[in-house]
Image (tube, rainbow, N blue to C red):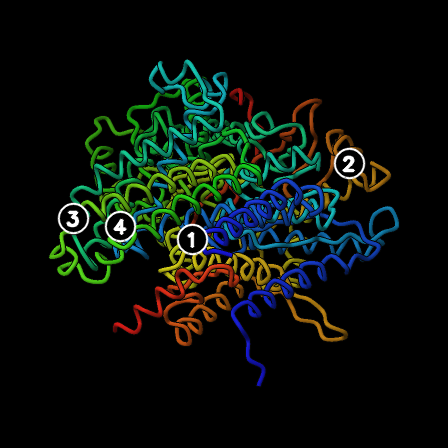
Amino acid sequence: MSREARITLLVLVALVAGAAVAFGAPHVLSDYFVRIILLIALNAILVLALSLSNGFTGVFSLGHVGFIGAGAYISGILSIPVQQKMALLPHLPTFLHAFSLPFLPATLVAGLLTALLAVVVGYPLMRLSGYFVSVATMGFLIIVNVVLINASDFTRGARTFTGVPLETTLPWVTGWLAITVFVLARLVYSPFGRAMKAVRDDTIAASAVGIGVLRTRLIAFVIGAFFSGVGGSLYAHYLGSFSPNTFYFALTMSLITMLVLGGMGSLTGAVVGVICVSLLSEVLRSVERGFTIGDFAVPALFGASQIVLGFIFILVMIFRPKGIMGDRELTFGLTQRSATVNQTEERKR
Amino acid sequence: MIKLTRRGTIGLGLGAFFALASASTALAADTIKIGYPANLTGIQASLDGPMLNGAKLAASEINAAGGVLGQQIELVVYDSKSDSTTISTVASQLIDSDKVVGIIGFADSDSVLAIGPQVQKAQIPFITPGATSPKLPSQLGNEIFLAAFGDNVQAAVGAEFALNKLNGKTAYLLTDIGTEYTTLLSDYFVTAYEHGGGKILERDTYKIGDKTFTAQIAKLKALSPQPDFVYASSNAEEIGLILKQMRQAGINLPVVGGDGYDTPLLIQVGGDAAKDTYFTTHAYIGEGATPKVQAFIGAYTKSAGNAPENAFAALGYDSVKLMADAIKRAGAPDPAKIRDALAATSGLDGVTGTITYRPGISVPDKSVSVIGVKDGKLVLASEAAPTFVAEP
């Protein structure tokens, strides 16, 4: 089989498997497991969006959660039913009172507006490198948080924003995940993707061979922001009620942990990171309630899950500093694309 | 040595996950399961922790007395980490995996808003021991019950206490606009206070997490004539700091507030500055309390190892008794029957007062305790039901 055919086969198999899980799981598994799968897929979208700038372009952003928050609030404001809008957000501008959008258009608008926001924010910030861009994007996150708290006519301030219809189902999230993976894979393993990695590995050499550093970083940042906004909208319609602090440092830390643990330069690594961290924290959350094995009873130790999780992260970073996957992709042997590329790269070094 | 491949590791992890997750459901014994999600870590821990201890005490008392309907009751406790995503996961775990017949939980309205849609959809009766927003049942649905009074009731008692006992005809109003609870409480206070003939001279706001209140205090100091008292609708963390900074600025007016003051932090942080402070809350659990409360204090101290930290411990205790009473009257551990029995609760005598639900209203009419601070100690200043209550 030719390489192209193999890749097509792999994509088809993945799509069929994804669709089977998305539509089959709610009939077979209990709501709890469906929710876990849904959260994994949702977090995978967010982490993939983050990996584009943090992993592939070398712009270590701490501000993506700002885009997630913006996306969540934008789609929330757009999709609250009209009659509830009057009661919950009485001071909205009248044109926003008049209508409410269904789930998909609200999500698309949220994604596009956050992408626009990313253009405005990214244009000055993407000139910075290294630690400076991390601190500057963190500044953006803080600004978003302060705006969400103070624009109380639109967001109810620091109080819980509620009344968003619960429409995020597993097929929706897996559908969006498939789109995210497809777009990102096309992007990362394209000539433009090479440019991104060149900018990451050596900015000066990249600009010397004619790669526009600012342009490359900005495009990666904006596309990442689009999917962050989409993910934010999915989050909003999953939770139904949230507050500005839902989208702040705690979420930033958990997404970055998933990304770094999975491997920063790998799309499948990002997904593996999400799966590992999510399952581990779920297992630990159930174990910390205490359990009995035979006559041996372990008492409840609430809070222990965070400690164990932190300890495991330290161990992974010591023994696999590049994360579980590093910059390799999980291909199940069907395509050797990235593996061969890495071997040639390693030989060059 | 066994060499673990990457795929092998992932497979092992997945296997362990499903094994553990199914193991926890295999322990089903012949008990009536009541779900108890609690924010045992995170910002709500100082309220939810004591509440859980109270709830566990009630459950063990009920079981020692033979249980309900001949079965033991079991509290299924999960830590929901003061995080809305975890709360929704825990809710599905309780409803689908543990098959609980009722759920009790949370001291704040925000967490209840997070769990509400799921319990409503699954038609599982839900009691919140500590959340006090009287709007919750109308926002979420008919499965939601409050074990505490609504904010409109405590605000009215606060207003009447200030008008009649403190002779406060004019007030300065300070509101934390960062949380649902303080914003609502402040609105209800204004309605009740102005209805009673009081006048608000000036109002100002701050947000939860603020550490300095100099601007607000300067505004208060500049008022001429000075108001008779200050109504500060605040949460536990901030009120101590507000009092301290106000007394340092030379303002010795009485300060009145709601049950958000009711944590050990008030006196720990406020210190001497907490003098002449009054707040409305669910029960007085200090020296000279009623025999029923004394008995609760004794039992709680024995089981938890320390005296009840605040009235939320008593609310957790009462909520379990309330649920058990409803299960008994329902005659079967069936969520729909329990809900109906819960709605018909009448004259249930609890530590925090008597619980009765009027038809169609899931917020009980309860008396409110007003507690004052004297010589660094909490004393009961008044106990009353209000004469006028603002609409929710």
Residue B196 is labelled as: none
User: Residue at horizontal 37%, vertical 71%?
Assistant: A321
Mark 4, other Cα within 10 Å: few <14 / some 14–19 / many ≥20: many
Instruction: Relative to B276, say whether B18 is above or below.
Output: below
Q: Amino acid at mark 3?
A: Gly
Q: Secondary structure at mark 3?
A: loop
Considering depth in this image, is B97 or A87 the residue closer to the camera?
A: B97
Q: Amino acid at mark 1?
A: Leu
Are the numbered discs 4 and 2 placed on the same chain, yes or no? Answer: no
Residue B265 is labelled as: 1
Considering depth in this image, is B110 or B362 the residue closer to the camera?
A: B110
Task: Please tell me which of labels 1 and 2 falls first in the chain.
Answer: 1
- Tell me where residue B259 appears, x and y as whole percent: 49, 40
- Tell me where residue B140 appears, x and y as whole percent: 59, 29
- Tell me where residue A224 appears, x and y as whole percent: 33, 44
Mark 2, other Cα within 10 Å: few <14 / some 14–19 / many ≥20: many
Q: Quadrant of residue B361?
A: top right
Q: In the picture provided, is A63 more to the left or to the right than B183?
A: left
Outermost residue on the right side: it is: B70
Name the chain under label 2.
Answer: B
Q: Residue tagged by mark 2?
A: B338
Mark 4 to mark 3: distance in Å?
24 Å
User: Residue at horizontal 34%, vertical 32%?
Assistant: A112
Mark 1, other Cα within 10 Å: few <14 / some 14–19 / many ≥20: some
Considering depth in this image, is B379 or B151 the residue closer to the camera?
A: B151
Residue A138 is labelled as: 4
